[in-house]
Image (cartoon, grey):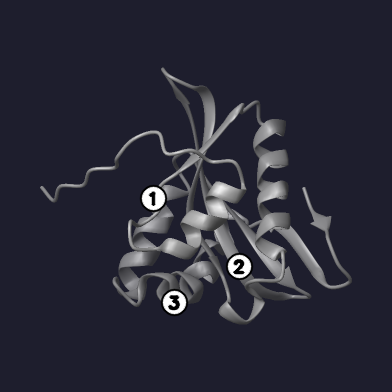
Amino acid sequence: MTKTIAMSFSFKLIEKDKINCIIPLMQKLTNNKNSDAVLKERFAEMVEQNYECAGVYDGDILIGISGMWFQTRHYAGKSMEVDHVYIEESYQGKGLGKQFFKWLYSYATSKGCNISELNTYVQNYPSHKFYYNEGYEIFGYHFYKTL
């Protein structure tokens, strides 16, 4: 499923065997929290689960990503959980994120989803504004514990 929004921007799924192409953008998003080797290992496992990833392209150049987890939730039914959304800084603030999410919603609907959910870091205020404008509501808290 590919949709072009402007002369050179397009959105499309990233093939499982090409998933490592997202690593440079993930490193920017997470400030190099994990090594490339760790990310390669984790993505290899993720693509064999209910995970997919979509990219934003300026021509042939990957400038944005969003992971998508698909599952059925007892409280929501079939849903898409958006994960690690990132668009290169020089492309932000131009409406590209809104168009990307429109594509993500359409893709999720085509897979039978009726809900989109996500987590965002408490300190990431620009993302909060964006997600509120997209119609997301705060449903709960996300807790994390290292085992």
- Residue 120 visible? The answer is yes
Image coordinates of residue 89 in percent, x first then y, are 57, 78
Cα distance in 3D space between marks 2 and 3: 11 Å
- What residue is disc 1 on? 45
- Which disc number belongs to residue 125? none
Label 1 amino acid? Glu
- What residue is disc 3 on? 28
Side of 142 relative to 109 (left or right): left
Label 2 amino acid? Gly
Image coordinates of residue 28 in percent, x first then y, are 44, 77
Image coordinates of residue 138 in percent, x first then y, are 42, 39
Categorize mark 2 by other alpha carbons within 10 Å: few (<14), some (14-19), many (20+): many
Label 3 amino acid? Lys
Side of 32 relative to 109 (left or right): left
Q: Quadrant of residue 99?
A: bottom right
Q: Quick check: marks 1 and 2 in contact, CB under 8 Å?
A: no
Q: Is residue 121 above or below residue 23?
A: above
- Which disc number belongs to residue 64? 2
47 and 71: which one is in front?
Answer: 71
Nearer the observer: mark 1 or 2; the answer is 2
11 and 21: which one is in front?
Answer: 11
Which sits earlier in the primary sequence, circle 3 or circle 1? 3
Which sits earlier in the primary sequence, circle 1 or circle 2? 1
Q: Residue furthest right?
A: 7
User: Element under label 2?
Assistant: strand
**Which residue appears at 52% of the width and 68% of the height?**
22
Q: Is residue 80 above or below residue 28?
A: above
- Residue 84 visible? The answer is no
